[in-house]
Amino acid sequence: MLTLNPELALLFDLDGVVIDSMPTHTLAWERYLEAHGINPRDVEARMHGKRNDDLVRDLFGEHLSNEAIFEHGAAKERLFRELMGSTLEAKLVPGIREFLAEASEIVPLAVGTNAEPANVDFILNGAGIRKYFRAVVDGSQVRRAKPAPDVYLRGAELVGVAPADCIVFEDSPVGIQAARAAGMRVVGLLTHATELENVDLAVPDFVHPELESWLSAQLSATRAAR
């Protein structure tokens, strides 16, 4: 049973943290690029942590209009949702549903993601987990996407908790950089990496026993500081 301080808040990235969606994103980009005559080599490494407009410019070139950039991104995300289809539940990171249900009764939770709004809705509504989050912030709602700290600072503001009292769950170096820039503690999810640097704790999923003991230690540290 989690016992956290109500003055703490937990903030979650979406892709790779709540849902193991990166393989499906990679496949969607590979198919989309191939359909446009572009070699998809290295797309997986290039896509991590980027907002779609930045990734489209990287893959297709800086010469595109804003309208063309938006259309490429939207078309790829439609393909992603088609590929994800009925596998959504099976791709949730182990233990996340139970963790969210329990933690949301104790502390405020928020999402901070670079994901497209349509994908955020698809995942949170499709999995029936939106109800656990007091705030949902995506890259379209802030001036700067990750690795800037804006999504996490906005999430902390919306749940009314100081950044120093926020714990972020992240799976990518870009997201970790954003969380650190916001002055927050970081739990790294090893959903598609064997190790992550600059995190306070790294776990493979939300059922790992070390997660609960670490969170309990954060409670003790927060109480001692007050």
Image (spheres, helix red, strand yellow):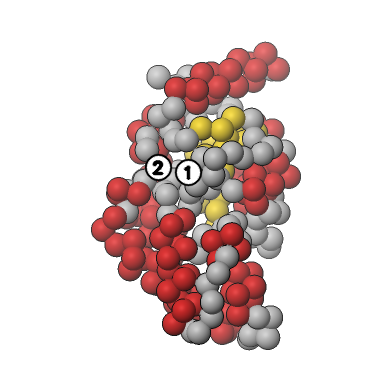
Q: State whether residue 186 appears in this view.
A: yes
Q: Nearer the viewer, residue 119 or 50?
A: 50
Quadrant of res 62: bottom right
Q: CA distance from mark 2 to mark 1?
A: 8 Å
User: Quick one: SS at disc 1?
Assistant: loop
Vertical relation: 216 (above or below) 137: above
Vertical relation: 116 (above or below) 100: below
Looking at the image, which residue is at 44% across and 82% down?
Answer: 35
Looking at the image, which residue is at 61% across and 40% down?
Answer: 196
**Residue 30, image x and y in percent?**
46, 71
User: Quick one: SS at disc 2?
Assistant: loop
Residue linked to disc 1: 191
Query: What residue occupies the far left of the structure in this picture?
Result: 86
Q: Are marks 2 and 1 in contact (CB under 8 Å)?
A: yes
Quadrant of res 143: bottom right
Mark toward the start of the polypeptide (2 vs 1): 2
Q: Nearer the viewer, residue 61 or 181?
A: 61
Q: Nearer the viewer, residue 44 or 178?
A: 44
